[in-house]
Each structure stands twice: as structure tokens, then as C-alpha cells.
Amino acid sequence: MRRFLLTGLIVSLGCASSRIPNTDVPDTSENRDVIAFCERYRRAVETRDARALLAMASPRYFEDGGTPDGTDDYGLDGLQRLLTAWADEVNEVRYEIRYRRISVSESDTRRMNVEFTYTGSYTLRRPAGVAAAEARAADSRPAGHLAIDPVRGSEQAQQGEDVWYRRVADNRLELEREGDTIRIVSGM
């Protein structure tokens, strides 16, 4: 009986070590490279480094917004405008990622999808008088201005003067390898 339990423990420990630590992703050199890139992305989000995030984006970056009419679609120029507003209005960010799966496209082995669950917590800058103005005219924000709750489903927590929002959700980064460089095609 002891041998059976010991063998089961060794097998389960052996299976656990075949994954990159703290992920559900198989431990291969290719997957480690992808996770290392995604960790640079995660740190750039936490430090609100719009320039680094733009440098990670492919020239072919495109978001379809998930609606059929296309009015919320944008490419690299739209991403740049969004990141500029985001960096100006977001005060603090905590961004954690649990990597679930990396898959390579069968039709183009340079393209990969990284599926993950993230926990994002952030505060927004609130200039004097903004709260009262928001209550009066939420629709009159200038283009590029973030809403106080820019992510549907976020939870708001008030602490002092900062307003913290928190969201846990699944996401997918679509990546493309360009030589030795990895770029984000969509999903930021």
C-alpha cells in the first residue's frame, strides 16, 4: 500500500513539474519565451507605460470590439489614442495574470493565442469638480476621455479620495512572431 501511495505522489509531482510554475501551460522553451513576453506586457500595464505597450503592438494591430456594426473597431492609431487617454487618467494599476493556454495557429505557425484570466485593479484620476460634473453630464465627455467605470462589470470600492475598480475576467492575446520578436496583434 505504501508503495502505491509513494508511486502516486511521485507521478503527481512529476506531472506538476511539466508546467511552467504558476501557470497551466506546458513547460517548453517556446512557451517560456511567450510567457516572458506576456510578463513584460503585464509589467507595462502595471507601470502605465503606454510607450512600451505601443512598442509591443504589431503594425497590423486590430480590435473588432465584438459588435457587428464596426463603429467600435480600431487599429494601431486607435490603440495609441486609447493608451494616451488611459495613461493620463489611470492613477494606479495592479494587474495579475493566470496563464491558461498557449496555442499555435495551424495555418500560420508565426501566430499564437495566449488565453489567460486576469485580475485588474486600478484607480482613476479625478480632477476637482469631476464627480459633480459627471453626475450632471456623463455624456458630454470629450473624445478619448475614459468613463469613470471604463470596463463593464467592474466593481467599485471607495478608499479615501481614490476610487478603486476591480475586474476579474478571461482574455486572449493574439500574438505574432516577427523573426525573434513577438508582437501583439489584438487583445490589449
Image (spheres, rainbow, N blue to C red):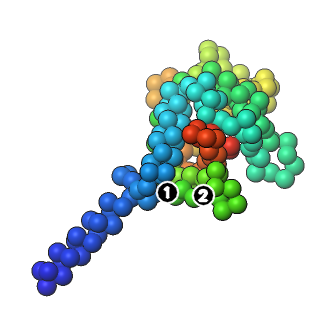
Which residue occupies the foreground of this view, 70 or 21?
21
Q: Amino acid at mark 1?
A: Arg
Relative side of 53 to 58, left or right: left
Q: Are marks 2 and 1 in contact (CB under 8 Å)?
A: no
Q: Residue furthest front?
A: 179
Question: Measuring 56% from the left and 52% from the top, which residue is drawn there?
Answer: 114
Q: Which element type, helix, strand or loop, lies under badge 2? A: strand
Residue 23 in which image quadrant: bottom left
Asked whether residue 32 appears in the rendered view, the answer is yes
- Specify few, some or many for label 1: CA neighbours under 10 Å numbering under 14, 14-19, or 20 or more: some
Q: Residue furthest left?
A: 2
Q: Which element type, helix, strand or loop, lies under badge 1? A: strand
Residue that carries the numbered disc 1 in the rendered image:
100
Q: Is residue 105 above or below residue 53?
A: below
Q: Quadrant of the C terminus?
A: top right
Residue 59 in which image quadrant: top right
- Specify few, some or many for label 2: CA neighbours under 10 Å numbering under 14, 14-19, or 20 or more: some
Q: Amino acid at mark 2?
A: Val
Q: Residue furthest top?
A: 128
Which residue occupies the foreground of this view, 129 or 184?
184
Relative side of 172 to 33, left or right: right
Question: Measuring 49% from the left and 57% from the top, which residue is drawn there?
Answer: 100
Q: Is residue 116 above or below residue 43?
A: below
Q: Position of residue 158 (x, y in %)?
A: 50, 32
Residue that carries the numbered disc 2 in the rendered image:
104
Q: Residue furthest right?
A: 69
Which residue occupies the foreground of this view, 80 or 185?
185
Q: Position of residue 20 (x, y in %)?
A: 39, 53
Question: Measuring 60% from the left and 57% from the top, which residue is drawn there?
Answer: 104
